[in-house]
Image (spheres, grey):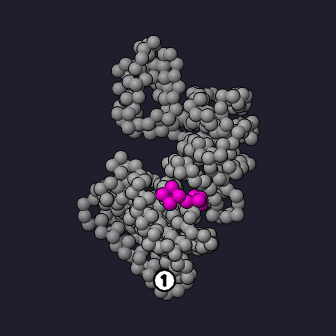
């Protein structure tokens, strides 16, 4: 069994869906995971925000616009009357449901029910299209097997048990279609795996069915060795390890959702990143094989805030870092990078929602400085200590760029540097020129 996930752009129009249908109707047993058509989830978030504010006109305007888009897609997608009518009725029933929320109380439960509609509509339309074209595909409702536990983490035991049970009812079926992103929570309510979570769905399903391969189909030919928006002549990396992929996914390479690496790694299932627009390109294969003696890629993460905490009391004291970390923890703010000296510590955060309170608390026992508009540049590769000279090449490349923090040795495949946002483009270009 293979698991193939297609993102919102890959199914973003009738024509693109027809294209995806060609890619999934090749021989072999498959579970196809789809995101909602591109833009849908953003629109659903917008609708929910209007409904929270009881702005029904605002909500209706977005609902009607989105519904019209889906009706147009249906008219283009199907060639015969039977499925065209089925499609129109399906879209209408989901939008009637969304519209029903403009008359009632609106809470987080209703919001999650609305957010689930995009994937539900998109997969149902796609499955109708396959059926219209004579394929024996089965639509698997993700809400019947995808589940999170009381800690909002995937309930992998539940997922495996229920998915296996459902699949065993269709032992002859070769092609299954299901929704990415959506799930039920520990209380059985409709929920989701957070924005961009369809990759996570694919990885969890891959692990649950012990797939031979997980394919993430997107609109670029794999993970590149630098950010193509800032650097010319980047190239796709043929192979990388799960650890390298996890660092790159977290530090800015927006191709694969960071959460999706772990389930595949634990189950040791290779993940391929492939391009819907160029299906024959080799893409990137992520697996447990390690790649020695190379620097693999550079990525950058924007909107980072650095907090420098200095205190005479840190000198020769123990428990100082614990006090610092507890403050960030109490505001549910995670720390990404950290560097220390004997009299101070600098940390970075990518979520500054509680920055003011955090700084207030830190100032009770230390001097605090905050730098906004920072960027983490991360170099990923075989950076074990024995590999002499790699750090030198990185610093040589960046010799004209002011560096605010350096983190090395946290893992064996990453050096992270904190720089000003305005130097990002120069830094990425210089690194590409010197390293690749
Ligand atoms: N449709 C969801 C989103 O836009 C999930 C996904 O695309 O992965 O966040
Ligand atoms: Mg995505």
The picture places residue 19, in percent across and down from the top left corner, at: 61, 71
Residue 419 occupies which quadrant of the picture?
top right
| Horizontal relation, residue 5 to residue 63: left or right | right
Quarter of the image where the C terminus is located: top right
Q: Is residue 133 magenta?
A: no
- Marks counted in the figure total 1
Quarter of the image where the N terminus is located: bottom right
> Can residue 49 be seen?
no
Q: Residues within 10 Å of mark 1 (few under 14, many from 20)?
A: some
Residue 26 occupies which quadrant of the picture?
bottom right
SS of the residue at dot 1? helix
Q: Residue at x 57, y 69 (%)?
A: 29
Judge whether 435 appears above or below 254 on screen: above
The picture places residue 222, in percent across and down from the top left corner, at: 65, 54
The one of 326 and 347 positioned closer to us in this rendering: 326
Judge whether 203 appears above or below 78 on screen: above
Q: What residue did someone put label 1 on?
A: 83
The picture places residue 422, in percent across and down from the top left corner, at: 60, 36
The picture places residue 399, in percent across and down from the top left corner, at: 70, 28
Judge whether 25 appears above or below 52 on screen: below
Chain part drawn in magenta: 206-217
Q: Residue at x 66, y 33 (%)?
A: 383
Residue 248 occupies which quadrant of the picture?
top right
The one of 383 and 257 positioned closer to us in this rendering: 383
């Amino acid at each position: 069994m293979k698991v193939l996930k297609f993102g919102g752009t890959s199914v973003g129009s009738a024509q693109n869906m027809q294209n995806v249908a060609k890619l999934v109707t090749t021989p072999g047993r498959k579970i196809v995971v789809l995101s909602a058509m591109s833009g849908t989830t953003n629109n659903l978030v917008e609708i929910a925000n209007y409904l929270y504010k009881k702005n029904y006109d605002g909500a209706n305007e977005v609902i009607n616009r989105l519904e019209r888009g889906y009706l147009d897609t249906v008219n283009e997608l199907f060639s015969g009357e039977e499925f065209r009518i089925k499609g129109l009725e399906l879209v209408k029933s989901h939008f009637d449901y969304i519209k029903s929320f403009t008359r009632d109380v609106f809470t987080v439960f209703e919001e999650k029910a609305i957010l689930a509609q995009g994937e539900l509509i998109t997969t149902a339309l796609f499955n109708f299209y396959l059926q219209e074209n004579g394929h024996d595909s089965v639509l698997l409702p993700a809400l019947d097997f995808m589940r999170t536990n009381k800690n909002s983490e995937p309930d992998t035991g539940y997922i495996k048990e229920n998915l296996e049970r459902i699949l065993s009812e269709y032992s002859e079926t070769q092609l299954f279609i299901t929704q990415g992103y959506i799930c039920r929570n520990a209380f059985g309510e409709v929920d989701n795996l957070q924005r961009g979570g369809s990759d996570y769905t694919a990885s969890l399903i891959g692990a649950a069915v012990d797939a031979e391969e997980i394919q993430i189909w997107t609109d670029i030919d794999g993970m590149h060795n630098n950010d193509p928006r800032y650097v010319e002549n980047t190239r796709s990396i043929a192979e990388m390890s799960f650890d390298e992929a996890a660092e790159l996914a977290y530090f800015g390479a927006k191709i694969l959702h960071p959460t999706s690496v772990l389930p595949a790694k634990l189950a040791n299932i290779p993940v391929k990143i492939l391009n819907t627009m160029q299906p024959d390109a080799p893409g990137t294969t992520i697996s447990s094989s390690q790649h020695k003696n190379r620097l693999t890629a550079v990525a950058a993460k924007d909107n980072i805030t650095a907090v420098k905490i200095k205190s005479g009391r840190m000198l020769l004291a123990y428990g100082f870092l614990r006090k610092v970390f507890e403050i960030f923890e109490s505001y549910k703010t995670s720390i990404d990078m950290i560097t220390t000296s004997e009299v101070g510590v600098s940390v970075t955060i990518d979520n500054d929602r509680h920055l003011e309170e955090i700084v207030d608390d830190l100032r009770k026992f230390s001097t605090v400085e905050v730098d906004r508009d920072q960027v983490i540049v991360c170099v990923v590769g075989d950076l074990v200590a024995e590999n002499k000279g790699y750090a030198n090449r990185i610093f040589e490349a960046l010799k004209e760029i002011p560096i605010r923090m350096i983190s090395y040795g946290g893992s064996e495949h990453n050096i992270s540097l904190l720089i000003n946002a305005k130097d990002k483009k120069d830094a990425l270009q210089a690194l590409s020129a010197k390293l690749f």
